[in-house]
Image (spheres, rainbow, N blue to C red):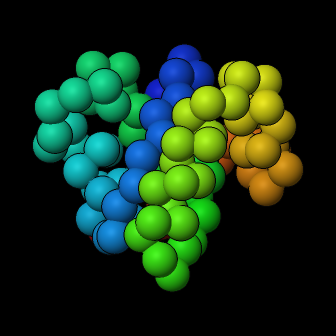
Amino acid sequence: MASARGTLYIGVTNDLEKRAWEHKNNVVEGFSKKYFCHKLIYFEHFSYINDAIAREKQLKGWRRSKKENLIRSLNSHWNDLSSDWYS
């Protein structure tokens, strides 16, 4: 997730659509609410939670520039990938 100013939030969920909605609507207290991380700009799917958690930890350890390159590789304009999920 990202804010309009470019702050990045990385997390794990078993229900991406629900979690993105929660971010957009500031339902859960914490980092993403504090920094208005409302845009889903990148995601990966995993079959096993342990793999997802390992990937989350890996991404959180990366330099910002490496994270930006990964995002741009699939979403060059940082469009909100969930913009048409909700009515």
Residue nearer the viewer, 66 or 5: 66
Q: Is residue 26 left or right of residue 79?
A: left
| Residue under the image location 69 percent in, 30 percent down | 62
Residue 11 in the image: above or below residue 86 = above
Residue nearer the viewer, 73 or 54: 54
| Residue under the image location 53 percent in, 42 percent down | 57
Which of the 4 quarters of the picture holds residue 25? top left
- Location of residue 27 in the rendering, given as x and y in whole percent from the top left corner: 14, 43
Residue nearer the viewer, 17 or 9: 9
Quadrant of image for the C terminus: bottom left
- Location of residue 41 in the rendering, given as x and y in whole percent from the top left corner: 59, 47
Q: Is residue 65 left or right of residue 18?
A: right
Examine the rendering and report whether any part of residue 76 can be seen.
yes
Residue 13 in the image: above or below residue 4 = below
Residue 38 in the image: above or below residue 64 = below
| Residue under the image location 34 percent in, 70 percent down | 14
Q: Total label count?
A: 0
- Location of residue 17 in the rendering, given as x and y in whole percent from the top left corner: 36, 67
- Location of residue 66 in the rendering, given as x and y in whole percent from the top left corner: 79, 31
Q: Is residue 84 left or right of residue 17?
A: right
Residue 25 in the image: above or below residue 5 = below
| Farthest bottom residue in view | 47
Which of the 4 quarters of the picture holds residue 67? top right
Examine the rendering and report whether any part of residue 17 can be seen.
no
| Residue under the image location 78 percent in, 24 percent down | 65
